Image: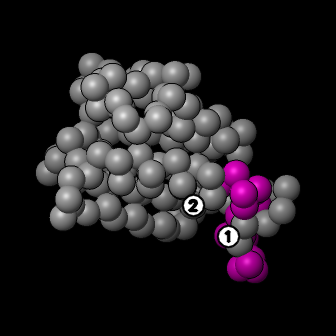
């Protein structure tokens, strides 16, 4: 794997930059798709201890709580009516989950208390 970060020291992240970019693209595209006009998409990236943490949230409708565990399954679409006309096959979050898992990390989706979806991606740092 090639290094995603150019920083030196123990907090360097090692991973496939194209695959991690694909994860972020899939998540952000999902947020764009469901955020209403004049809504917001906000992301934050921090290194905490031995992890790099990406948090991405939007002001869209969020998720049905009963279906949250299904979001990262292959071909899963929360509501077929939400995806009509978008060409969405229900693979983006599945692919993102697979890539993050292959990098030794985790990815979760939840609803923010103030509304909208919240994605959290945690990847280990300092491992080549």
Vertical relation: 33 (above or below) 125: above
Q: Position of residue 32 (x, y in %)?
A: 36, 54
Q: Residues within 10 Å of mark 2 (few under 14, many from 20)?
A: some
Vertical relation: 44 (above or below) 68: below
Q: Are marks 1 and 2 in contact (CB under 8 Å)?
A: yes
Residue found at x 40% / y 38%: 86
Q: Quadrant of residue 57?
A: bottom left
- The residue that mark 1 highlights is 11
Residue found at x 61% / y 36%: 95
Give the quadrant of the N terminus.
bottom right
Q: Is residue 76 visible?
A: yes
Range drawn in magenta: 6-20
Q: Position of residue 74 (x, y in %)?
A: 55, 22
Residue found at x 51% / y 36%: 93
Q: Is residue 122 visible?
A: no
Residue 79 falls left or right of residue 11: left
Q: Nearer the viewer, residue 24 or 87?
A: 87
14 is within the stretch colored magenta: yes
Residue 62 falls left or right of residue 76: left
Q: Position of residue 117 (x, y in %)?
A: 29, 45
Q: Tell me, for residue 52, which label it has, or none.
A: 2
Which circle's residue, 1 or 2, is located before the other in the chain?
1
Q: Quadrant of residue 20?
A: bottom right
Q: Position of residue 116 (x, y in %)?
A: 23, 47
Q: Quadrant of residue 79?
A: top left
Residue 64 falls left or right of residue 21: left
């Amino acid at each position: 794997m090639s290094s995603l970060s150019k920083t030196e020291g123990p907090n360097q992240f090692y991973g496939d930059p194209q695959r991690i970019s694909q994860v972020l693209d899939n998540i952000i595209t999902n947020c764009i798709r469901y955020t209403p006009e004049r809504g917001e998409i906000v992301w934050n990236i921090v290194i905490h201890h031995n992890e790099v943490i990406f948090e991405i949230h939007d002001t869209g409708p969020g998720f049905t709580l009963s279906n949250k565990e299904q979001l990262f399954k292959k071909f899963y679409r929360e509501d077929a009516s939400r995806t009509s006309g978008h060409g969405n096959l229900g693979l983006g979050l599945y692919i993102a989950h697979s890539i993050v898992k292959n990098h030794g990390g985790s990815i979760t989706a939840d609803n923010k208390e103030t509304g909208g979806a919240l994605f959290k991606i945690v990847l280990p740092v300092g491992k080549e």
